[in-house]
Image (cartoon, rainbow, N blue to C red):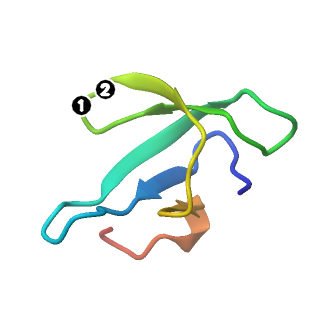
Amino acid sequence: MEADKGDRLVVHGRIVGEQDRVMEVVEVLGPPHSPPFRVRDERGHELIMVPGPDSQVERPGDRRPGA
């Protein structure tokens, strides 16, 4: 999985009814474009994570208007 600063990382809920978690990539800590990533969640908390198969990256140009 590749991401850059400013991309959004979407982690899909694993339980029926669980909301997706959306985080902003604030720093790439691995080799260029590679995990681990420092991310900031909707509440402003920052964490370092290596995304799993339940995650996807949204680049700023990929977003739908109003999303």
Residue 45 lies left or right of residue 10; in this view the side is: left
Could you tell me residue 33's position as x and y percent? 79, 45
Please, what is the three-letter code of the amino acid marked with disc 2? Answer: Gly
Residue carrying label 2: 44
Residue 3 lies left or right of residue 13; in this view the side is: right
Q: Which residue lies furthest to the bottom in this view?
A: 64
Secondary structure, mark 1, is loop
Residue visible at 58% across and 50% down?
A: 7
Relative depth, front residue between 66 and 2 = 2
Could you tell me residue 53's position as x and y percent? 56, 63
Could you tell me residue 15's position as x and y percent? 22, 65
Relative depth, front residue between 28 and 19 = 19
- Check contact, mark 1 vs mark 2: CB within 8 A: yes
Relative depth, front residue between 48 and 53 = 53
Residue visible at 70% across and 45% down?
A: 4
Task: Give the numbered dot on residue 43.
Answer: 1
Q: Height in image: 14 above or below 24?
A: below
